[in-house]
Image (cartoon, grey):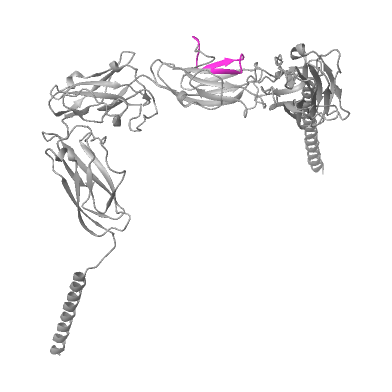
């Protein structure tokens, strides 16, 4: 029993300890909740007294900003006083001359920049707005409200009425004035409309009994909220974007800023806003950090002591500038901006390095004795070859805008046909195309200079000189010199086609010496007859050019508006400029079918004969078997 009592006593002690801990924890939680409630109460009380209304500063609204010195003194409009009250009461002032700088509103957290009939404002339910107007062209005016109450109406005219507030408190009327002011308070959370009327010049004039008469000259839509998010960062309303310069933030990345030229600076613009789209007051730390060693600074320039992290408490509407940590080296970085420990945005961009690779692609054959190439089919200024440059990370780069930085490797010029290489147009963009859509402006366009002798130089190279002085040599490429078209041949890509297939007709042009012709216009339009086929793209025109191999390709669909007729056909290809001199009209043979399976009479007869022969053999075998028995 003593042992049992000891066990029971131990259990009771443990139970009492657990109960004590539970009660202690509950009291602690209750204390925390009470503290939070007290903090909330203090915040709401401060807001009601007009303290927080000072924090809302919409930077875009230069003429009418909640919490700033009012500068709106325009006549014939309904103005909202935007100076925050520090006394806990809204204060309309009679004199129109001074009201713009002295009238105050209570609990105003947002006012847009407009000033006529499309104004908007936001306030807390415990606040009050001071409204004022100046009328130099009307002697009778009235202001109405869809709800709430007017009070404290006044006027700048010493000898006239001080403003008559209606018994329902929803309108106020002035019989003669050049400047008027009144206070308005909401009745509850919701949306209210405040309107200003004056005489319309046709006998319709506001009155104490009919205030909504005449012409509507001012209107404010007021949103009344229970509590305000003014002065507190709202990620939804905060703006952050990659840009190509240090400008105001828009929230939309600028594509040109995502890939920056070597030695240039990247930009990220931002503005820390509250729930009303207003920039909040500076004071809490802004921290910008970058990966891969990128140098960043919150400001418009890179400071001498800048590193991969920058901290600022000075401006909530600013720019992050980004630079390469190593000159001429490519950089890909991700920049993260935080405000008071909360991530605002994360943006990635690239700063390209200097040229580390040059890629040349042949595009067109030069005429013998030629030194220019202006065929716009291959670029705005034309080119016999195109050049693209890349940094060491493989990023496409824009070369220095100076054609002289490209030079031929002299030892690769054969001097027989190709005598020189030069650049006619330097690439000017990273990801765009010219009007033809054929030659992106990311290509520098090169010109081949040819002697009077046709031929090909198959091991040409091009040098590029970086601003740093380093020289980069291109891949080997071929360039060809040839004469104008003189003769030609033509052929289809297949001997037979089924209805609905695509057929390509290749015309190969030769110069007078039998070389594949240069890339030039073929002169007058070709006359091509291709029975049972329909040309794609219409007839060729005089501007049709041969390609780098001296060819032109025409495309057809097999079939016409009616079903094809099975059979063999002959097409004719006539380039009259050449057949009139030395070439011959080309005949191209082909066959077409519907693709349906057909059996001829001869095939049927052949099958019958084979069947009879098989039956005869079986009869003979049967006869031999019977005779043996």
The image quarter in which residue 184 lies = top right
Quadrant where the image shows the C terminus: bottom left
Identity of the residue drawn at 27% across and 51% down:
533
Placement of the N terminus among the 4 image quadrants: top right
Above or below, comparing residue 480 to residue 557 in the picture: above
Residue at 28% from the left image edge and 59% from the top image edge: 595
Q: Is residue 304 magenta?
A: yes
Q: Residue at x 18, y 74 (%)?
A: 610
Is 15 or 460 nearer to us in this picture? 460
User: Is residue 34 in view from this perspective?
Assistant: no
Question: Which residue is outermost to the top?
Answer: 304
Residue 43 placement: quadrant: top right
Front residue of this view, candidates 218 and 169: 218
Q: Position of residue 484 (x, y in %)?
A: 17, 32
Return the residue found at the far front.
Answer: 202
Taking the magenta stretch, the answer to whether it contains residue 102 is no
Q: Where residue 215 sits in the image (x, y, percent)?
A: 74, 27
Q: Residue furthest right?
A: 167
Q: Position of residue 319 (x, y in %)?
A: 54, 18
Report whether residue 136 is seen: yes
Where residue 218 sits in the image (x, y, percent)? Answer: 73, 25
Position of 516 compared to 332: left or right?
left
Q: Out of 13 and 294, give the one closest to the viewer.
A: 294
Residue drawn at x 51%, y 24% is 242
State which region is magenta: 303-319
Give the tally of numbered discs: 0
């Amino acid at each position: 029993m003593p042992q049992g009592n000891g066990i029971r006593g131990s259990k009771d002690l443990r139970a009492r300890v657990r109960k004590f801990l539970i009660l202690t924890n509950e009291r602690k939680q209750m204390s925390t909740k009470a503290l939070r409630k007290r903090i909330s109460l203090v915040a709401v009380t401060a807001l009601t007294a007009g303290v927080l209304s000072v924090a809302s500063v919409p930077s875009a609204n230069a003429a009418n900003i909640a919490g700033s010195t009012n500068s709106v003194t325009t006549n014939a409009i309904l103005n909202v006083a935007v100076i925050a009250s520090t006394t806990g009461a809204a204060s309309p002032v009679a004199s129109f001359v001074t009201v713009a700088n002295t009238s105050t509103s209570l609990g105003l957290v947002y006012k847009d920049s407009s000033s006529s009939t499309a104004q908007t404002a936001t306030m807390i339910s415990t606040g009050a707005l001071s409204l004022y107007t100046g009328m130099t062209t009307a002697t009778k005016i009235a202001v109405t409200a869809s709800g709430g109450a007017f009070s404290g109406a006044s006027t700048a005219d010493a000898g006239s009425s001080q403003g008559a507030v209606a018994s329902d408190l929803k309108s106020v009327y002035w019989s003669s004035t050049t400047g008027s002011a009144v206070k308005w308070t909401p009745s509850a959370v919701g949306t209210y409309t405040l309107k200003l009327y004056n005489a319309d010049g046709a006998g319709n004039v506001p009155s104490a009994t009919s205030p909504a008469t005449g012409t509507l000259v001012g209107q404010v839509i007021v949103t009344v909220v229970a509590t305000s998010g003014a002065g507190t960062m709202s990620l939804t309303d905060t703006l952050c974007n990659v840009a190509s310069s240090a400008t105001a933030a828009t929230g939309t990345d600028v594509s040109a800023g995502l890939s920056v030229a070597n030695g240039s600076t990247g930009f990220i613009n931002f503005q820390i806003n509250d729930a009303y789209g207003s920039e909040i007051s500076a004071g809490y730390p802004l921290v910008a950090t970058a990966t891969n060693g990128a140098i960043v600074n919150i400001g418009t320039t890179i400071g001498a002591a800048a590193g991969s992290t920058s901290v600022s408490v000075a401006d909530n509407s600013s720019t992050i500038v980004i630079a390469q940590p190593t000159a001429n080296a490519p950089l890909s970085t991700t920049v993260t901006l935080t405000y008071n420990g909360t991530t605002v945005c994360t943006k990635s961009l690239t700063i390209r390095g200097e040229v580390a690779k040059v890629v040349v692609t042949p595009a067109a054959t030069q005429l013998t004795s030629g030194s220019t190439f202006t065929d716009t089919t291959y670029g705005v200024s034309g080119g016999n070859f195109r050049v693209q440059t890349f940094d060491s990370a493989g990023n496409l780069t824009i070369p220095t805008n100076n054609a002289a930085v490209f030079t031929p490797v002299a030892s690769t010029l054969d001097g027989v046909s190709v005598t020189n290489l030069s650049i006619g147009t330097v690439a000017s963009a990273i990801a765009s195309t010219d009007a033809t859509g054929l030659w992106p402006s990311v290509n520098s366009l090169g010109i081949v200079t040819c002697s009077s002798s046709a031929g090909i130089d198959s091991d040409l190279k091009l040098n590029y000189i970086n601003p740093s002085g380093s020289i980069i040599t291109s891949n080997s490429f071929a360039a060809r010199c040839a004469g104008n078209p003189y003769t030609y041949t033509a052929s289809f890509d297949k001997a037979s086609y089924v209805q609905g297939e695509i057929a390509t007709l290749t015309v190969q042009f030769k110069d007078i010496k039998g070389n594949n012709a240069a890339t030039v216009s073929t002169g007058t339009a070709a006359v091509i007859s291709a029975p049972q086929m329909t040309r794609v793209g219409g007839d060729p025109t005089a501007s049709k050019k041969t390609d780098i191999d001296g060819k032109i390709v025409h495309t057809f669909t097999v079939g016409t508006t009616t079903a094809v007729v099975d059979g063999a056909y002959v097409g004719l290809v006539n380039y009259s400029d050449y057949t009139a001199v030395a070439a011959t009209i080309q005949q191209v043979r082909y066959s077409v079918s519907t693709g349906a399976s057909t059996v001829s009479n001869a095939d049927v007869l052949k099958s019958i004969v084979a069947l009879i022969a098989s039956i005869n053999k079986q009869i003979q075998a049967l006869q031999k078997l019977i005779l043996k028995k």
